[in-house]
């Protein structure tokens, strides 16, 4: 990336932040002296205009900025429907590379043109995301494969975006995500997203999931073809199936429930049993069969627990589940969520922290968009009853990617409106509780029959 391009890109980011900052200020002035109904209308107008502008700009910007927009677009259930619709374009494919550019990358990485390496090569990508695009091909042995090609120069683009991290903070703050500690989120993403540039690391991550869940009854992960993979090329077995949008459009209630529970169990199993989890629960990273069976894609943003890391965090979850307010405060102080002797009201802290975990505090619960909207509104309300908690709460770096996973999966479940005995299901993973659903029984049977299972 040239200096001119870097400056231009940085200026675009500044323009997004500045333009919406002006919109926000104007919106605040217009609210003065208005009725509550009129204030709500003005707030909605601001959200829609801001979301539309962000989507238009970020949809053309591969790299960190687009991924940031994707995160905003899928988690922020508190936005009005028109604003959500505007940001939804960021969940779709990015503009692809010009014809021939991907072929040049393949030639440089694998030593020959894709038409020479593969028996068949489709020059038109089937998907284009934030740092690479995917082409369909067939190997000389007849295996259908997906070839992910990294965009030329994306490393410079990504590092330029990371240097503009302060603008990322501003964009998150614009959407009132202060309760999620946007700075901690971006700082951790800086480290993890730098790793995404090396497809060899992603291949290692994906191969670990393939090996761990070999023969699993409902976790499907495509195999990696190492001979066709390099630092900038990743080749895996091809997977047919519905995209998220196509699946939601045609799926019946049983299929949606099955898909949601599988996504949830994959996340929980990865965190609690495998110790490696995908921190990018973006809807584009799944393929679905009509019955709700799920194939998991894209393992670039993966978090691996260091020794003792999860053991330090998990007592906070146990205290929430047990409604042990005193124990929760102690656990949060131990891991760094709160400083010792913060002076906060124990019950206020517990109520605030427990809000996202309501599904696990009752025997059965149905995730909905309204639940997500209400929960995000609660944790991001800087003027509400939890004001002092929000101001003092810290987000330890080790929790950031897990937090992203929790919110992302919850948003998925809310859109699918999945119902289940979540408390008992979580107990399966936290304390070895008995299977509470048919899928839980299948998972337990698979683990019992596989001594090497995580």
Image (cartoon, helix red, strand yellow):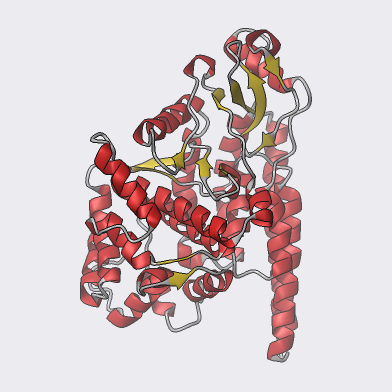
With 341 as the anchor, is 208 left or right in this view?
A: right
| Quadrant of the image containing the N terminus | top right
Question: Which percent across, then down, holds residue 376?
Answer: 52, 70
Between 423 and 255, which is closer to the camera in this rendering?
255
With 94 as the anchor, is 374 left or right in this view?
A: left
Question: Which percent across, then down, holds residue 36?
Answer: 68, 89
The answer to whether one can see residue 16 in this image is no
Q: Residue at x 47, y 72 (%)?
A: 379
Between 275 and 37, which is closer to the camera in this rendering?
275
The answer to whether one can see residue 448 in this image is yes
Q: Residue at x 59, y 29 (%)?
A: 238
Question: Which percent across, then down, holds residue 111?
Answer: 60, 8
Q: Residue at x 58, y 33 (%)?
A: 239
Res. 396 image quadrant? bottom left
Question: Which percent across, then down, holds residue 62?
Answer: 66, 39
| Quadrant of the image containing the C terminus | top left
Does residue 67 lie above or below 336 as drawn?
above
In the rendered image, the residue lying farthest to the right is 99
Does residue 382 lie above or below 419 as drawn?
below
Q: Residue at x 54, y 59 (%)?
A: 254
Res. 450 image quadrant? top left
Instruction: Give the mark count.
Output: 0
With 393 as the anchor, is 367 left or right in this view?
A: right
Between 14 and 354, which is closer to the camera in this rendering?
354
Does residue 269 lie above or below 373 as drawn?
above
């Amino acid at each position: 990336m040239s200096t001119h391009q870097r400056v231009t890109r940085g200026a675009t980011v500044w323009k997004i932040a500045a333009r919406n900052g002006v919109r926000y200020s104007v919106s605040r002035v217009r609210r003065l002296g208005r009725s509550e109904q009129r204030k709500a209308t003005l707030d909605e107008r601001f959200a829609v205009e801001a979301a539309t502008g962000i989507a238009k700009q970020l949809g053309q910007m591969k790299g960190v900025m687009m991924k940031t927009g994707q995160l905003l677009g899928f988690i922020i259930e508190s936005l009005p429907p028109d604003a959500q619709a505007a940001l939804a374009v960021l969940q779709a494919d990015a503009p692809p590379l010009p014809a021939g550019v991907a072929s040049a990358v393949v030639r440089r990485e694998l030593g020959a043109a894709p038409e020479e390496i593969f028996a068949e090569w489709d020059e038109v990508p089937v998907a284009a995301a934030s740092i690479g695009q995917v082409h369909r091909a067939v190997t000389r042995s007849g295996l259908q494969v997906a070839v992910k090609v990294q965009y030329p120069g994306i490393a410079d683009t990504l590092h330029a975006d990371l240097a503009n991290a302060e603008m990322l903070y501003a964009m998150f703050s614009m959407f009132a995500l202060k309760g999620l500690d946007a700075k901690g989120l971006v700082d951790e993403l800086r480290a993890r997203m730098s790793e995404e540039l090396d497809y060899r690391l992603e291949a290692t991550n994906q191969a670990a999931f393939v090996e761990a869940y070999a023969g699993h009854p409902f976790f499907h992960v495509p195999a990696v073809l190492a001979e066709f993979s390099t630092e900038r090329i990743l080749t895996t077995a091809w997977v047919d199936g519905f995209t998220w949008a196509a699946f939601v459009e045609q799926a019946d209630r049983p299929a949606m429930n099955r898909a949601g529970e599988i996504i949830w169990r994959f996340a929980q199993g990865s965190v609690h049993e495998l110790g490696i989890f995908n921190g990018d629960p973006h809807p584009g990273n799944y393929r679905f069969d009509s019955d709700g069976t799920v194939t998991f894609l894209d393992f670039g943003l993966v978090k691996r627990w260091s020794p003792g890391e999860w053991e330090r965090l998990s007592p906070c979850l146990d205290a929430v589940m047990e409604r042990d307010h005193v124990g929760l405060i102690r656990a949060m102080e131990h891991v760094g969520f709160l400083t010792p002797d913060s002076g906060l009201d124990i019950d206020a802290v517990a109520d605030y922290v427990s809000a996202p975990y309501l599904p696990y505090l009752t025997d059965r619960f149905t995730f909905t968009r309204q639940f997500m909207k209400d929960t995000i509104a609660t944790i991001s309300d800087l003027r509400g009853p939890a004001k002092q908690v929000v101001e003092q709460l810290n987000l330890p770096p080790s929790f950031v990617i897990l937090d992203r996973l929790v919110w992302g999966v919850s948003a998925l479940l809310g859109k699918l409106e999945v119902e289940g005995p979540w408390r008992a299901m979580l107990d399966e993973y936290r304390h070895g509780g008995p299977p509470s659903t048919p899928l839980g029984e299948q998972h337990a049977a698979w683990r019992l029959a596989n001594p090497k299972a995580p």
